[in-house]
Amino acid sequence: MRFDPRFQPNDLGLVSLDTIAYGGDYNPEQWPREIWEEDITLMHQAGVNLVSVGIWSWAKLEPCEGEFDFEWLDQLLDLLHEGGIRVDLATPTAAPPAWFYKKYPQARVVHRDGTVMTNGSRGMAAPSSPDYLRACANITRALAERYSNHPALAMWHVHNEYGAPVSDSYDEASRDAWRIWLRERYDTLDGLNEAWGTSFWGQTYYEWDEIPTPAVSATVTNPAMRLDYTRFSSDAVLRCFIQERDIIKEYSTAPVTTNFMALNCPSMDLWAWAQEVDVVSNDYYLEAADPRNQIKLSLDADLTRSIARGKPWILLEHSTSGVNWQDRNVAKKPLEMARNSLATLARGADGIMFFQWRAARFGAEKFHSAMLPHAGTDSRIFREVCDLGARLAELSEQGVTGTTVPADVAILWDWESLWAQGLEWRPSIDANARERILEFYTQLWEDKVTIDFAHPEQDLSRYKLVLAPASYLLTDAASENLKSYVAAGGVLAVSYFSGIVNENDTVRHGGLSVAVDEVLGLRIEEFLPLREHETVSISTTGALGEGQYTGTVWADDIVLNGAEPVATYVDGPKPDGAAITRNEFGQGSAWYISSRVMGGDLRNFVGALYEDAGVTARRDLPADFEVVERVSESGQRFTFLINHTVEQVDYTPRRSPSLIGDESAPSSSITVPAAEVVVVQE
Amino acid sequence: MRFDPRFQPNDLGLVSLDTIAYGGDYNPEQWPREIWEEDITLMHQAGVNLVSVGIWSWAKLEPCEGEFDFEWLDQLLDLLHEGGIRVDLATPTAAPPAWFYKKYPQARVVHRDGTVMTNGSRGMAAPSSPDYLRACANITRALAERYSNHPALAMWHVHNEYGAPVSDSYDEASRDAWRIWLRERYDTLDGLNEAWGTSFWGQTYYEWDEIPTPAVSATVTNPAMRLDYTRFSSDAVLRCFIQERDIIKEYSTAPVTTNFMALNCPSMDLWAWAQEVDVVSNDYYLEAADPRNQIKLSLDADLTRSIARGKPWILLEHSTSGVNWQDRNVAKKPLEMARNSLATLARGADGIMFFQWRAARFGAEKFHSAMLPHAGTDSRIFREVCDLGARLAELSEQGVTGTTVPADVAILWDWESLWAQGLEWRPSIDANARERILEFYTQLWEDKVTIDFAHPEQDLSRYKLVLAPASYLLTDAASENLKSYVAAGGVLAVSYFSGIVNENDTVRHGGLSVAVDEVLGLRIEEFLPLREHETVSISTTGALGEGQYTGTVWADDIVLNGAEPVATYVDGPKPDGAAITRNEFGQGSAWYISSRVMGGDLRNFVGALYEDAGVTARRDLPADFEVVERVSESGQRFTFLINHTVEQVDYTPRRSPSLIGDESAPSSSITVPAAEVVVVQE
Amino acid sequence: MRFDPRFQPNDLGLVSLDTIAYGGDYNPEQWPREIWEEDITLMHQAGVNLVSVGIWSWAKLEPCEGEFDFEWLDQLLDLLHEGGIRVDLATPTAAPPAWFYKKYPQARVVHRDGTVMTNGSRGMAAPSSPDYLRACANITRALAERYSNHPALAMWHVHNEYGAPVSDSYDEASRDAWRIWLRERYDTLDGLNEAWGTSFWGQTYYEWDEIPTPAVSATVTNPAMRLDYTRFSSDAVLRCFIQERDIIKEYSTAPVTTNFMALNCPSMDLWAWAQEVDVVSNDYYLEAADPRNQIKLSLDADLTRSIARGKPWILLEHSTSGVNWQDRNVAKKPLEMARNSLATLARGADGIMFFQWRAARFGAEKFHSAMLPHAGTDSRIFREVCDLGARLAELSEQGVTGTTVPADVAILWDWESLWAQGLEWRPSIDANARERILEFYTQLWEDKVTIDFAHPEQDLSRYKLVLAPASYLLTDAASENLKSYVAAGGVLAVSYFSGIVNENDTVRHGGLSVAVDEVLGLRIEEFLPLREHETVSISTTGALGEGQYTGTVWADDIVLNGAEPVATYVDGPKPDGAAITRNEFGQGSAWYISSRVMGGDLRNFVGALYEDAGVTARRDLPADFEVVERVSESGQRFTFLINHTVEQVDYTPRRSPSLIGDESAPSSSITVPAAEVVVVQE
């Protein structure tokens, strides 16, 4: 199951809510019943209109196998309905009850090193375990039967954060399912042996049941096998979702979702997953150690919108303040929660939800913030939660829901390539794919250039500029797609260690960069990775202007084949060799940058790309002043001005596409106070 | 089994020795018999009067199950008795013989990740294994029967360093014992489910045999379950001790001890353990990497005396020079061993013993120093050992044994709180409980203020000042105890992240700091942990004087509720918020400090506490000049002056309680040469 | 099986090739058959005359147990023979087929912590598994029967890199074989118990089957047991080799080799191994992170020549450019490959081979460089490969093959001592044996002083100077050998932590340094390891000149017993104690240096040793200009001048033995351009 370029997302989802969803996970089974009424009163005060219920309730709902207790949930849903709060009803399959583990110990997850995972925590059982799948089907069917017609029901929330903390397992059921999956993928053992290159290191398989799981071995495991096991594991988990979704759909017409973790659960291929849900949902938590963590939050939102193929989505979990599972769980500053929430809304979300409504007094997450903190209602957090609720209601009124986010630029993103590049024994451990993507993204974010993430095989013709900061694995189809895009007039920029292997992690016959050679007008004779802390000087010219960059991590021995060098190595492993090139190809142009450049150097490089592609940037505004637009089909435009700085910022609306040198002040100006958000409606 | 505030320690123990015990572990089975006579001659030369015998002798004493060979031990004890050396006779259960592991492989210790521990090293079997317990009982009974009336016998040394290297095991016998322990603790599953908060993450148990051990899981395990497993493990090991003690007591009236590791074996609740022994014994080894490791040695001695409820105790192991198991095993400098030994004596020990008498030529510890080193008698170490023996004999003559150590200040110490705070997913990994205790302790040590460690539930009325640098877990009883203490006129100082949870690691309803809110006159709305390397400026006033502190690691959002702010945040996450407060409560006062301050800032803060409480400090003397007193019931006073500096120090006896500004020189002065110890008797 | 001082290497091997072997691993089963002809054409172009074939071919040759398919190999060998390329034919036992693991799961390797190693990678099965041994015998016999008389056959290549990635295993077959090995070594359990010192920590064994493997335990395992398990593991793997060798010898007269990894597989005792092969072969790869990695390459070559007892050997694998398994796989610079290859030749190799002929497109090593890179023939690498082939042919013509490498200096090297010192719980983790050897080696390399590595028990009389930078374990025989060497006029220099234990890791009765006390004229009373980053000042005099050294890591408390102190500690743990000593003993002298000195200090110290021993050094040339000689029996002399610098160097032939102050220029001078190699023939 993988990305399908012809897939059309459906239009279910939040439209039926007719308003911005606001609320959080609600776990009333952790509280005495007398608290429930207070909760509903306070939810009203906060503007909450949707809560996720039952995520951890399996043990309460099915105290022993096949015996159900729905009474408390009946009461709760009735109470919520009476209170006008709608329900995102969960299947509780992320946390099988203790009786399950006692009865089916063989369903426990097995780590790659053979360690068996005990219960007493959270985390599903082995994804391919028939016992687990049957138990999931039973509780899902019971819930669907009972609550499909409950008036409080707005949406189904299948499971929780599939893929975290369990994605791959090395138990016997997984091994058996893996062999079936391989048979479906390759049909014959000859096909498998060729795809995996088993002739290397003498690994040829002659029977399907000779194939082990890629558990720990004496040294590095066959990389194509490991890549396939990651694919298999994503599919195996996705099949768990599909089973539950299909059972629900037998009974219910409400949309079905599950909460992704677009950035933080790297093991699931969300291009494939997003094709199976009625509405895309996502969880995101700030990285406390990063003082500019608003950038990754935006990246995550753009990625989520992209896998939703541009449709509105729901932020199903974020936090009102600090979390509990990082090394140092920094609390959010005043107004920071609102900036986070509105930035997410600006990037296409139609729902803003939290983990969780009321802070838990016990368990592993008692130090996680909540809408209603341990300190109670007389607290900064609860006051800000109420303010945000009011503001979202106002934006709902103004018609933000359903609008979309335009973008002229795309960054290529492919989980399969990230998985493949992440395996052992690559030329340099410093050649980190996510690092390059984040660095390019950061520059565009500072330039107020909104981007989409794009699958390398998708139609790219709507974009002026496509960046490939980390596309180690490119299929033949992707290679052709990039050529077509540039030939038709697009501008493409490729960073180092891209286009190296096909879908089997195999270098193509003919050289290291066959997949991009033609469009880039060059070939790479040899990788020249740098030592730790080693730097190279790069002399720029032409479209980049006369100047000097500093590179780290990587260089290439480039043989030009039509491309024009716009920067040259001054020193390092290949003095005088081309460092950055530009190639005219068809109606467009393709750039290649062979080293890791940062900061001002990257800013200059990206500026040249904007010029080449005609992309409008806003470098006249402070870097940490965020600007994003949502547009309705009728052309109604909401401009979100988010001031992450400690000074007020005067904003003037968009200017001509030229980004350089236009110093003439435009007419009207809007002042955004420090730390605040202004939404301009046109 | 836990701390009992009504417990009265008995008076057995070293009184029967009538002298300071001096000697070490003696493992003659490692040597040819002709060496034994030489050993006894050299022991006399060194002043040795007690040796610990048989700690590792199980395999020699019981070559196969149920067959005993005592001949060599008979001879040895006779020889020692003839030589006038008394014996601390061990049960050898810390090292089961190889035949035991062959016959009972299921008794092997299982690590939390499932790894099974092989023999070939040391370390007991699984503490709850019925096979291990039965084998222990057999060898113990055989020894007790045979030697109870031997005239050399002075004391029983059960096992060795219980809890190290084995404290918890995840084998089947442990799992079964754990369920029984839980049943005893909670009586019903409802009680257990509520205490553990199993409704969080859907972990409700409906049958006792559904409960697993908290072995590794896909993510973080229920913290209350883990805390209970640590309690259970401490109890399970303690039950091993109790079984052996009770068997010995059937035959013998000699006191029974076992050697604790107060600081270095964090897994045993020594408040509970110390209630079961006739005399408290302890092992302590310097941390070579710490250039001022004399401070932790003092801390360990104070802690050991405190769990002995102030009674004299025995240092059963320390080293004459370097050890062998640290990264860099720095040798002791000339005179350092004597300083260490006499500082320990000063802090209440009536026995000074070493591991070991004669350096082993083979095995894992051959590079550990000994009383008789590899270099033999013509060596600095052996000469210093003889000098120390003579000095201890002299102090015995003067009547040091049986005297006690007075203290005006207590620092709270509770293993349960340390365990709880040490679990995963706390607000900040930098909020390290032992770090705060050590830092406060160090300041008081430099100020020559002797302290006791106190359990939070014990009677504190004898202290002028009580410090709570790290009391994350406080029971309701402890909370009440602290209030009573302050109400009656005590001074209490609480550092951050204290009073947060009850005994089930549960935040109390009503807020984060309910247990200390009332006495402190404030509430904590939110924790504000700092980023790594982040600092905050704190402006002080009032009792602290006008000044500026630097804080790291932590800050709080404090809501004052009667307390007076004596310091305020200048910057950081809550500018202008209270940083340090003082609250008058009843007859006393309670301070709160919400950030990590160090060095001169902490010195200033603690100085204000002394003033408030009327505690006498000696800041006129060098920091590394140690002063401690022992006092007899009749008022005889031994003042130990221990000069850890490289200059001589002139010491004048104690002055008036005012520590600041009294520059007038007192009358008589005592000169303590560099590196030496003077004991003044009054 | 261990070093035998009476062993005489045979004279088989490369003599039969009559030329310098040049080529690489050739894995044609990874390529379509149409590529094979192209390969042979390109091999001719490159000057290749030998290829290693079939290393990973087990699965191709024996698709299921007992059924063989040799057709493709027949064709390949015929094709190579027709093409005039000779074959180093491998037994493929480094990679058992998947069917083997399916059928014999009990033969899988078990890690020390109990983890079972899966297939899907490379690495042999458990070395003592009877199933593995039987399967190896079958495939080896089938190959030997079929190809012993094939005209292409030049040599047998048994297995691949024995000991990496599998050396020790903790499976049941290993446990059983271990007990048999122990019985052979010790005959009685009394002998074993005494050798291991099992009386320490109560580990006495009364039955052979009570002895476990030294798998993970609660704390540190008996060190003598672990040392023996390392010996056993080296022997168990060696027995795998011997089985295959003996089967081959039933059919074939061609020489049998296996590729060692002298520096990089620390688990095999190559002194013993080298006694079993017809010709010594070795693999070596540069450490990319080390900017002067040519030095370790030379060290490895000298070590390989030394275990070959001075006979010519084959470099069976190195790389044309970067490898794939290091963190940052830096490519070789232009001409670097030739320098590496010729430096190896200079140090006694008669064969220069690579992994591998053609870069693999798939599998774990696709980013490893090859003779024919991904970029094809139009590449720097292939051009340099052809140049090197031509140059080696020329040197063959000139008669380099069969010549030997003279050396006046030896450095002691003993795997048993390295193993023993590497165990846990030594006085300091900074006392790293390989570090000291490398540092001394580096100084001699810079001084153009060629060295041999010598076993401590071998006849040393041919050397002027013997260095013992790291001889922790010395047998009684070695102790006597060193005394005899010095008594007869040799110069010996011993660095700290040497001569401490005997072959059972036991400190001798009488002190820490009994094995070297007499020859050094001192005894060590106590080790005085330094703290991390701690330095000591050392004041030199006498033969070292008046000066000051800086020491780190170590100091000793030395008691002089005839030795003259030539340097004294100024500070540190033993101010005024002796730091460096010289002792006249018989006709020779013995030095001791008790701290870690580096750089100029070590240079000065070693210079004094040269003076004492009459060793000629060349300190007038740049440090990175390498000079080595090979000499024929008839006195023909090849001087290899290898310029690793970026400047040209003018070289004048060797001068008088005096290294200091001789500034007079000699007559003829040879210019070696930057990065190039000149071979001077006399």
Image (tube, coloured by chain):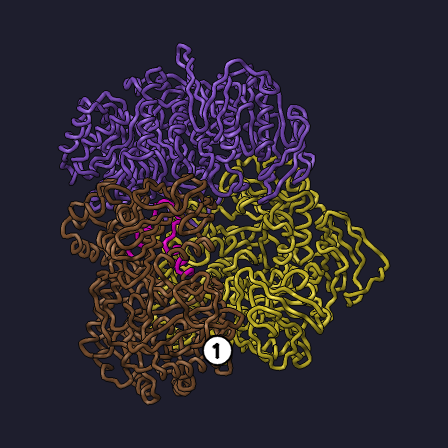
Chain colours: A purple, B brown, C yellow
Can you identify the residue that label 1 sits on?
B381
Q: Taking B47 as reference, is C539 left or right?
A: right
Point out residue C468 in the picture as x, y percentages from the top left corner: 60, 69
* Residue C396 appearing in the image: yes
Q: Is residue C601 above or below residue C202?
A: above
Point out residue B287 in the picture as x, y percentages from the top left corner: 44, 64
Q: Taking C61 as reference, is A99 left or right?
A: left
User: Which residue of the protein is positioned furthest toward the bottom in this rendering?
Assistant: B82
Q: Residues within 10 Å of mark 1 (few under 14, many from 20)?
A: many
Secondary structure, magenta segment, majority class: helix
User: Which residue of the protein is positioned furthest toward the top in this rendering?
Assistant: A634
At label 1, the amino acid type is: Ile
Q: In the depicted view, which residue is nearer to us: C254 or A228?
A: A228
Give the residues drawn in magenta, as a range. Answer: B415-443
Q: Is residue B150 above or below residue B593?
A: below
Q: Residue at x 33, y 66 (%)?
A: B407
Q: Residue at x 44, y 63 (%)?
A: B446
Looking at the rendered structure, the secondary structure element under dot 1 is helix
Q: In the depicted view, which residue is nearer to us: A678 or B263?
A: A678
Point out residue C554 in the picture as x, y percentages from the top left corner: 56, 67
Point out residue C484 in the picture as x, y percentages from the top left corner: 62, 78
Q: Residue at x 64, y 79 (%)?
A: C563
Q: Is residue A5 above or below residue B24?
A: above
* Residue C28 appearing in the image: no
Q: Is residue A60 above or below residue C577?
A: above
Chain letter of disc 1 in the image: B
Q: In the depicted view, which residue is nearer to us: A626 or A631?
A: A626
